[in-house]
Image (cartoon, rainbow, N blue to C red):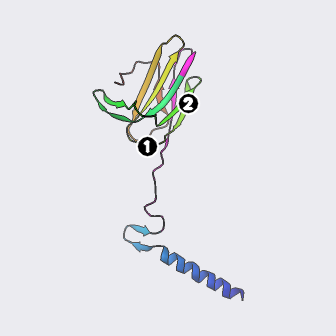
Amino acid sequence: MKKWYVMMFMGLALAACSQGGTQREGGFVGIGEGHVTASQGILRGVVHYKGNMDGTLVVEARASFPCTYGRCPVIERVPLGQERLNRPGPFAISLTENEENVILIATYQDKTGKTLVAHTLVPDPQKAIDPISLSLNRPHPPLR
């Protein structure tokens, strides 16, 4: 009696596998094909600063567009990701959308109003090199 159930189960399993897809040149065509989505990704990096921190430090990822300086951030839209830091150090920003040419911007503003900005272009966040380094110690070209 048990053999009959085992044989029936194996027959059903084989039938289900054979109907799930067919072999063709270039690979398997089956259930789930074409339903793969690219993950939005996480940008990881480190903010460097030699001075004392007595203000706010924000790291944000923004979409960009071509401009006179190469690429400029889109400031009219909500950032693709953002993180507030208490001090310089590591960060990890989860992107809300899958974009190319993301500009990563670290902005530090102290209590006196002095502002420092560091930025870098990340052409493909899926292939970003870990860790991305942002230094508030050196001057950066303008963003606009």
| Residue 73 in view in this figure | yes
| Residue 53 in view in this figure | no
Q: Residue at x 60, y 81 (%)?
A: 10
Considering the numbered disc 2 on the image, is that residue within a helix, a strand or a loop?
Answer: strand
Residue type at numbered disc 1? Lys
Residue 130 on image: x %, y %: 49, 37
The answer to whether residue 61 is above or below residue 143 is: below
CA gap between label 2 and label 1 equals 19 Å
Instruction: Based on the picture, tell me whether residue 22 belongs to the magenta stretch.
Output: no
Residue 24 on image: x %, y %: 38, 72
Residue type at numbered disc 2? Pro
Q: Quadrant of residue 73 in the image?
A: top left
Q: Residue at x 52, y 75 (%)?
A: 17
- Horizontal relation, residue 54 to residue 104: left or right: right
Q: Quadrant of residue 4 in the image?
A: bottom right
Quadrant location of the C terminus?
top left
Residue beneath disc 2: 90
Q: Residue at x 50, y 17 (%)?
A: 109
Considering the numbered disc 1 on the image, is that residue within a helix, a strand or a loop?
Answer: helix
What residue range appears in magenta? 31-56
Mark 1 crowdedness (10 Å alpha carbons): few <14, some 14-19, many ≥20: few
- Horizontal relation, residue 130 to residue 143: left or right: right
Disc number for residue 127: 1
Mark 2 or mark 1: name the one nearer the start of the chain.
2
Q: Residue at x 49, y 78 (%)?
A: 18
Report the number of discs. Answer: 2
